[in-house]
Image (cartoon, rainbow, N blue to C red):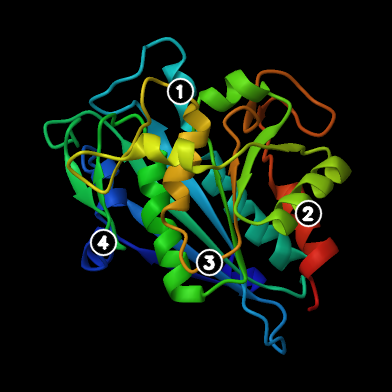
C-alpha cells in the first residue's frame, strides 16, 4: 500500500489502551492474537481545502461468538467476518492505484473473537473511547463494539466530510434483504440517495432501512449508557445501526452498510466469483468518482 502512496499506521493494544478504546479491546481479549487498528491515509488531492472522506471497516478475523459461542454448523465460514475491513483496504488500494483526486482515510479494526479464560463475559460493562459505557449482554454482538471505537478514532483524527462504515454486522439483515442487497442506514438523505443511485449503477445495490427513537430506546441499559443488543431480537439490524449512530458526533454525515448478506457468496454472480465478493469496493469507488473526486 505504501508503494501506491498510502500512508499506513498500525496501532497495537498498548496504543489503543492509552486512547481508552476498551470496547474494541474487550472483543479481542480472549485471543492470543493482538488486536490492531489499521489507519490508512491517501492524499490524492493535496490542493483541496475540503475535509477528507472516511471509511471504517469491521475486521473480526475469526468470530466464534466468544463466550456466547455460535453453533458449530457453519462456523468454519466465520473467517469472512472481516469483510468490512477487507472492503475498506481494497477501496483505499483502488483509489490510490488509479490516482484518484481525493483525500481519504480508511480505518480497519482488527480483532479475533475467541472464548478463553480471559474472554469478555456477558454482563461485563466497558467504557468506550468517547466515554460512553456499554453493557455487553451478548459477546457475539461484537462488531458494533469494534466499530464504536473505530468510528470515534476516525472522527477525532480526521474531521471527515462524511463517514461510511461497512460491516458483516447482523444475521437479521440476511433475513430482511437476502443476499442481493446490503442494508443501508444513514443520518443524511443526500448521502443515502447517492449510495442508492450508485448501487444501481454498479450492481452493488443497497436498500435503506429506518432509524428512529422507537428503535434507539431498545438499546438503553439499566446500568450503563447502552447495551449491545436490543430487546427480544426485534429489528436486530436497526438496533445495531442505532448503536453505531450513538458514536457519530456533531451531526457528521454518516452511512452504515450492513454487508452480512453480500460479503460472501456460495455461487458465482455476474460481478464476482463465489467466495469473498468484495461487495462495496466498486460501490464506494464509483461514489467517489461521481460525486466527490477533484473537489
Q: Which residue is mark 2?
A: 194
C-alpha distance separating marks 4 and 1 = 27 Å
Asked if disc 2 and disc 4 are in contact, CB closer than 8 Å, the reply is no
N-terminal label among 1 and 3: 3
Label 2 or label 3, whichever lies nearer to me, is 2
Left or right of 69? Residue 257 is right
N-terminal of the pair, mark 4 or mark 1, is 4
Splitting the image into 4 quarters, where does residue 161 fall? bottom right
**Most foreground residue, 225 or 53:** 225
Query: In the rendered view, would you say 56 is above or below 209?
Result: below
**Quarter of image, res 12:** bottom left
Q: Secondary structure at mark 1?
A: loop
User: From the viewer's perspective, is 242 left or right of 166?
Assistant: left
Q: Is residue 149 above or below residue 240?
A: below
Q: Which residue position holds label 4? A: 131
* Residue 209 visible to the viewer: yes
Horizontal side of residue 293 vs 171, given as left or right: right
Q: Residue 40: which disc?
A: 3
Does residue 59 show up?
A: no
Q: Position of residue 136 (x, y in %)?
A: 25, 37
Label 1 or label 2, whichever comes before in sequence order = 2
Mark 4 or mark 3, which is nearer the start of the sequence? 3
Which mark is drawn over residue 234?
1
Per the image, label 3 sits on a secondary structure element best described as: strand
Q: How far is mark 2 from mark 3, CA to CA?
A: 24 Å
Q: Earlier in the sequence, mark 2 or mark 3?
A: 3
Residue 207 position, x and y percent, is: 71, 36
Question: Looking at the image, is mark 2 or mark 4 earlier in the sequence?
Answer: 4
Residues under numbered marks 2 and 3 in contact, where contact means CB atoms less than 8 Å apart:
no
Give the Cα distance between marks 1 and 3. 36 Å
Question: Measured from the top left, where is residue 13 in percent x and y?
Answer: 25, 58
Label 3: few (<14), some or many (≥20) within 10 Å? many
Amino acid at each position: 500500500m505504501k508503494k501506491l502512496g498510502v500512508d499506513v499506521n498500525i496501532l497495537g493494544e498498548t496504543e489503543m489502551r492509552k486512547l481508552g478504546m476498551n470496547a474494541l479491546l474487550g472483543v479481542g481479549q480472549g485471543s492470543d492474537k493482538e488486536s490492531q487498528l489499521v489507519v490508512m491515509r491517501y492524499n490524492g488531492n493535496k490542493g483541496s481545502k475540503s475535509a477528507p472522506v472516511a471509511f471504517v471497516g469491521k475486521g473480526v478475523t475469526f468470530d466464534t461468538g466468544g463466550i456466547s459461542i455460535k453453533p458449530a454448523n457453519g462456523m468454519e465460514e466465520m473467517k469472512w467476518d472481516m469483510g468490512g475491513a477487507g472492503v475498506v483496504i481494497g477501496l483505499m488500494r483502488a483509489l490510490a492505484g488509479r490516482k484518484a483526486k481525493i483525500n481519504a482515510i480508511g480505518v480497519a479494526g482488527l480483532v479475533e473473537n475467541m472464548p478463553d479464560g480471559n474472554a469478555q463475559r456477558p454482563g461485563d460493562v466497558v467504557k468506550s473511547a468517547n466515554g460512553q459505557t456499554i453493557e455487553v449482554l451478548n459477546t457475539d454482538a461484537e462488531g458494533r463494539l469494534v466499530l464504536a471505537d473505530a468510528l470515534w478514532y476516525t472522527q477525532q483524527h480526521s474531521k471527515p466530510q462524511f463517514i461510511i462504515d461497512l460491516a458483516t454486522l447482523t444475521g437479521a439483515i440476511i433475513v430482511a434483504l437476502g443476499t442481493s442487497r446490503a442494508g443501508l442506514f444513514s443520518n443524511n438523505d443526500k448521502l443515502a440517495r447517492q449510495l442508492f443511485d450508485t448501487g444501481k449503477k454498479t450492481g452493488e445495490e443497497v436498500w435503506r432501512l429506518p432509524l428512529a427513537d422507537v428503535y434507539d430506546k431498545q438499546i438503553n441499559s439499566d446500568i450503563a449508557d447502552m447495551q449491545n443488543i436490543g430487546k427480544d431480537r426485534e429489528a436486530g439490524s436497526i438496533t445495531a445501526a442505532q448503536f453505531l449512530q450513538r458514536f457519530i458526533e456533531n451531526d457528521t454525515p454518516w452511512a452504515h452498510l450492513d454487508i452480512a448478506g453480500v460479503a460472501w457468496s456460495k455461487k458465482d454472480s455476474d460481478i464476482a466469483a463465489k467466495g469473498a465478493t468484495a461487495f462495496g469496493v466498486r460501490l464506494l469507488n464509483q461514489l467517489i468518482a461521481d460525486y466527490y473526486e477533484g473537489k
